[in-house]
Image (cartoon, rainbow, N blue to C red):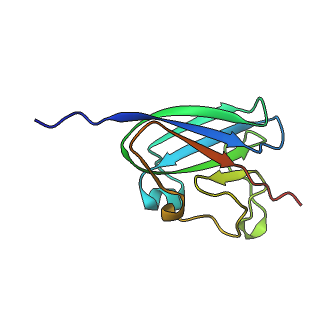
Amino acid sequence: MMGLSQSYELTVNIIGINEIKGSLRIAIFSNPENFKDKVNPADSAIIEVTSNTTSHTFKLNQDIYAIAVYHDENNDKQLNKRSLGIPTEGIGFSNLTSKRKRPPIFEESSFSLATDTTVQIPLFYNKE
């Protein structure tokens, strides 16, 4: 008989929020194509911004995941961008600790969830 799939707590700590306004949109992906296109997350959450750091805990089955977060400062439910696709709102990804010129691919942001885990994600802003 097959055992039931084990679920674990994944706590996402988001740091570096530049302004106390709007909301954070967190998406957790288990599929590389979905992560690339930012569609059909395995789980997601929308959290009101009330401080410069926040955390949210998900209950997920054991798998390989990657997390994408953005700070929807104006609450318009989309990541606002300048021409050339450069985000004007804060973004962050699991395993990304410094600002990059391009979004990471799934393999760069992914991690294995096999125990209760806490992931820290700094947000990066391209204000000009």
Give the quadrant of the N terminus: top left
Instruction: Place residue 16 in its image quadrant.
Output: top right
Which residue is drawn at the image coordinates 45% and 36% (left, top)?
A: 116
Residue at the limit of the structure toward the right, as seen here: 128
Left or right: residue 104 versus residue 89 is left
- Residue 20: x and y, percent? 82, 35
Left or right: residue 47 versus residue 124 is left
Residue nearest the viewer, comparing 29 with 9: 9
Which residue is drawn at the image coordinates 71% and 66% (left, top)?
A: 85
- Residue 68: x and y, percent? 59, 51
Relative vertical location of residue 56 with respect to residue 16 in this rendering, above or below:
above
Residue nearest the viewer, comparing 99 with 43: 99
Left or right: residue 8 versus residue 20 is left
Total numbered circles: 0
Give the quadrant of the C terminus: bottom right
Which residue is drawn at the image coordinates 76% and 51% (left, top)?
A: 89
Instruction: Place residue 118 in its image quadrant.
Output: top right
- Residue 25: x and y, percent? 63, 41
Residue at the limit of the structure toward the left, as seen here: 1
- Residue 22: x and y, percent? 76, 36
